Image: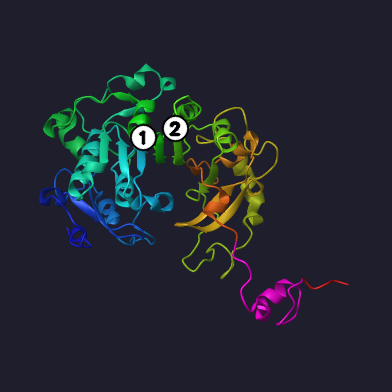
Amino acid sequence: MQCKQRRYAAPHCSEALLARSYTLPPRWPWGAFHLVMEFDANTCDLYSGGATSFCCGMAALNSPSGGSGDPESHVTEALASFLSHCARSSCRSIDFGANNGWMTGYMLSAGSHVLAVEPSKDFARAITETGRLNCGWADRLTVHNARACTQGMGKKCFAPSACAGRCSCGGWRWGNSPSQIDESHGEGCAERFGLPTNVSGLAFESLVWEAAAGTGEIDLIKMDADGPEGQWLKALRVMLHGDRPLRVRTIIVEASNVNPETMHHFQNVLGYTVLRLDKHDARRYVTREGFDAYSAPGSIEPLDRLQKQHEPIDRLKCKYSPPGPYRPLADNVPRTKLEDEWFAVRAMRHVFHIRPNTTVQGWATIMQPVLRCSYPMQYVLTLETADELLPEAQGSSPGERDSPERCRMLGYDKAPCPKRPHAVS
């Protein structure tokens, strides 16, 4: 396959696994690495028929349709922003809902020890093989082919799955269709590829403690499994208040079934700074030149300029509206009054900073999909403060009296001008 010909000089430790992998290109600060995405070479068979464009797109520096070939660049930007220290000191991460393992791969590429949890048998095997393929990763990678379960999810979560014999076991995959290997082998798929017959659940709390490895410290937890995130955050909240010391520095979560009270507690009781990633927002399109493509050319117009058009959507009850009794916008305070836009926050091009002390009602408004009945919002919760994430601008530059732009801001017609604003008579 042509898209496999460029390997970006990324080292590998298995020719056989390399043949079943696609090489993700270097994207700052990540180096290139190989991702196993098939059981039979050149088929992309962990996905539905016709998925070659997806596998090859992962290996593309730029997508044919424009932008990065990375389908979740907003998450990889966040990973880069909060795992940069792993190159200097040992750190530990968890990937709940690891899927095919590209986020696990980025965590490993950063230098982190990673515990990956993935219920689909074929994906879990592929993640393990990716760890063996990329030299130096296997010793830092633990993969659990299991569901992460809390007591609130009931006994059924812990019980063996009903997908006996098949290679996949639920979860999202490109195309939203069965994989080619499941289509070809049906209930004989697991036996054909030496995979376990059933998949059971493991206690979420036990997985967290395993990842902490006796240190009581976890640098980053990523949660994205299209459903259990609300239960996971509730369980983590209890653990953080428990007698056994635990510190989780950063959480990246797709807020499926997460209620506003939980987010309020993490922000206002546990002291997390919260950023909302701009995926599924679409009110901005920040160009590489630093402007908004949806604003007048060469500008960034106020975000509330079309608030009247957004208001009916902000009140609409949809599948991914926040659960619980609080209705979005019930107090008529729009999200533009609850969060601030931040630009160029470390590796993140554009995020929304949730204002401190936001109420539960405010959280209900923030967590409502921005687009009509779209997908859940994605958040970063971090113990780093706003000043640590985005320090205030530097002080004045030498010679600023000669800046026409500064003088105009202060009310003067031309430069040079004094440091004081122009007095209005």
Which residues are the magenta region? 393-420
- The amino acid on which the numbered mark 2 sits, given as a three-letter code, is Leu
Q: Is residue 415 above or below residue 383?
A: below
Judge the density around disc 2: few (<14), some (14-19), many (≥20) Cα neighbours within 10 Å. some
Of 63 and 396, the residue lying toward us: 396
Label 1, secondary structure: give it: helix
- Kindly check if marks 1 and 2 are in contact, taking CB atoms under 8 A apart as contact: yes
What's the residue at 44%, 57% (across, down)? 347
Q: Determine the residue located farthest toward the top in the rendered image.
A: 155
Can you see residue 174? no
Judge the density around disc 1: few (<14), some (14-19), many (≥20) Cα neighbours within 10 Å. many
Give the x, y percent position of residue 51: 26, 48
What numbered label is drawn on residue 246? 2
In which quadrant will I find the N terminus? bottom left
Label 2, secondary structure: give it: loop
What's the residue at 71%, 71% (across, down)? 409
What numbered label is drawn on residue 81? none
For marks 1 and 2 on the same chain, the one whose residue lies earlier in the sequence: 1
Can you see residue 57? yes
What's the residue at 19%, 25% (across, down)? 197
Give the x, y percent position of residue 111: 31, 49
- Quick check: 261 left or right of 251? right
Question: Which secondary structure class fits the magenta region best?
Answer: loop
Give the x, y percent position of residue 414: 72, 82
Q: Is residue 61 above or below residue 330?
A: below
In which quadrant will I find the C terminus? bottom right
- Quick check: 101 left or right of 247? left
Q: How many marks?
A: 2
- Write down the residue under mark 1: 212
- Quick check: 283 left or right of 3? right
